[in-house]
Image (cartoon, grey):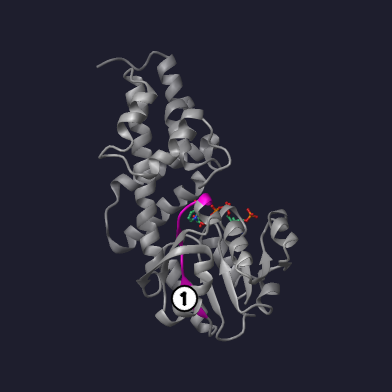
């Protein structure tokens, strides 16, 4: 099948590579062209813009950072939606908020395009291994038609319901991911300040009843202090917490814990951690200049 793929970052580049391995022909676009090189070397064709890609393909995937980037790719001056032939499918795998996904579904319908919101669970390594979980919102028939493509990139597909429901589940997942990571980092910093070794803390907490399984994967990064080459950039997790709070505002749900965590990640971004792995929230809490200066000034006294 001829597939258009827009967004070749950490996730998109690996997902597109798996479609290529599945024998599909790719036409690709990314804001930064260098990231397309390895796909181009394996036979993908470059398009100079989303609209240039549209007339050449049967299906379009988008895997972009945030709603604004998706909207620009679909509906902007060089957007693909106006040029895609009627009846084609657009599958948006980006993490966006449910209301935005429903809006894109409506825009697609107005152009006679079938739309699936299909954000993914799983990070860099899982994407490379084609073991992603797709959280799909949209028509069952459109999912059935797209299933063979999703199966090139993942091994689990959850049909959540109509438009926006895949985004809803993804937002709940990342609300949990962000708050749990921040709470764990805070606990580590507290334990260390009380004289416990990091080794004792990790050995005891990980695998225990209160720690989420994903935290084991973050141990090595925290021990080595190595947050570069992100699996999941901290700035996009903060974006997802923002999307969770926006969604909660729309439904009238209070989100006190999530709002605090969201602002914590914002502080971390302002101290330069945005492109690092989101586990760098530990580094921020342990070493933020604001916290260190309070300690050094002797302003932190035992109570
Ligand atoms: P990434 O490596 O930063 O890639 C982001 C992609 O969006 C790149 O293609 C980037 O283009 C493009 N982009 C960013 N801002 C743009 C703009 N203003 N206009 C046009 N294009 C823009 O991040 P990623 O981890 O692949 O994340 C992609 C999506 O997947 C996000 O929605 C994220 O929340 C979601 N997600 C990530 C993970 C993960 O573990 N990494 C897991 C599940 C879901 P450039 O290359 O030019 O920057």
Image coordinates of residue 242 in percent, x first then y, are 42, 52
Residue 115 highlighted magenta (yes or no):
yes
Observer able to see residue 297: yes
Whether residue 79 sits left or right of residue 191 in the image: it is right
Q: Residue at x 47, y 34 (%)?
A: 220
Whether residue 178 sits left or right of residue 93 in the image: it is left
Examine the image and state in which quarter residue 184 appears: top left
Q: Which residues are magenta?
A: 114-125
Image quarter where the C terminus lies is top left
Examine the image and state in which quarter residue 88 appears: bottom right
Viewer-nearest residue: 210 or 194: 210
- Indicate whether 193 appears above or below 35: above
Observer able to see residue 245: no
Examine the image and state in which quarter residue 179 appears: top left
Whether residue 290 sits left or right of residue 54 in the image: it is left
Q: Residue at x 43, y 33 (%)?
A: 282
Image quarter where the N terminus lies is bottom right
Image coordinates of residue 293 in percent, x first then y, are 45, 20
- Indicate whether 237 appears above or below 82: above
User: Where does ligand 1 appear, by image quarter?
Assistant: bottom right
Viewer-nearest residue: 57 or 270: 57
Residue 205 highlighted magenta (yes or no):
no
Residue located beneath label 1 in the image = 105
Callout count: 1
Viewer-nearest residue: 94 or 221: 221
Rate crowding at label 1 as few (under 14), some (14 to 19) or many (20 or more) other CA atoms within 10 Å: many
Whether residue 197 sits left or right of residue 293 in the image: it is left
Q: Secondary structure at mark 1?
A: helix
């Amino acid at each position: 099948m001829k597939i258009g793929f827009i967004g070749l970052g950490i996730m998109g580049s690996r997902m597109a590579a798996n479609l290529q391995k599945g024998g599909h022909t790719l036409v690709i676009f990314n804001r930064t062209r260098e990231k397309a090189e390895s796909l181009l070397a394996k036979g993908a064709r470059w398009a100079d813009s989303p609209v240039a890609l549209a007339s050449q393909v049967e299906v379009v995937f988008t895997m972009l950072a945030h709603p604004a980037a998706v909207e620009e790719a679909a509906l902007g001056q060089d957007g693909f939606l106006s040029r895609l032939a009627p009846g084609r499918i657009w599958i948006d795998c980006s993490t966006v908020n449910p209301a935005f996904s429903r809006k894109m579904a409506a825009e697609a319908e107005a152009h006679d395009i079938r739309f699936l919101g299909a954000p993914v669970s799983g990070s860099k390594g899982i994407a490379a291994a084609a073991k992603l979980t797709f959280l799909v919102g949209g028509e069952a028939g459109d999912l059935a038609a797209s299933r063979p493509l999703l199966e090139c990139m993942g091994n689990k597909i959850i049909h959540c319901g109509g438009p926006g429901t895949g985004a809803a589940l993804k937002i709940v997942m990342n609300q949990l991911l962000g708050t749990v990571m921040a709470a764990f980092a805070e606990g580590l910093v507290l334990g260390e300040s009380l004289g416990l070794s990091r080794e004792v803390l990790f050995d005891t907490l990980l695998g225990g009843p209160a720690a989420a399984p994903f935290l084991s994967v973050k141990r090595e990064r925290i021990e080595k202090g190595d947050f570069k080459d992100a699996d999941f950039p901290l700035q996009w997790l903060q974006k997802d917490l923002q999307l969770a709070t926006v969604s909660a505002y729309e439904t009238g749900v209070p989100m006190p814990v999530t709002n605090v965590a969201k602002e914590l990640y914002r502080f971390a971004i302002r101290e330069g951690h945005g492109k690092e792995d989101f586990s760098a929230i530990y580094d921020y809490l342990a070493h933020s200049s604001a916290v260190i200066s309070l300690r050094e000034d002797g302003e932190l006294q035992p109570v």
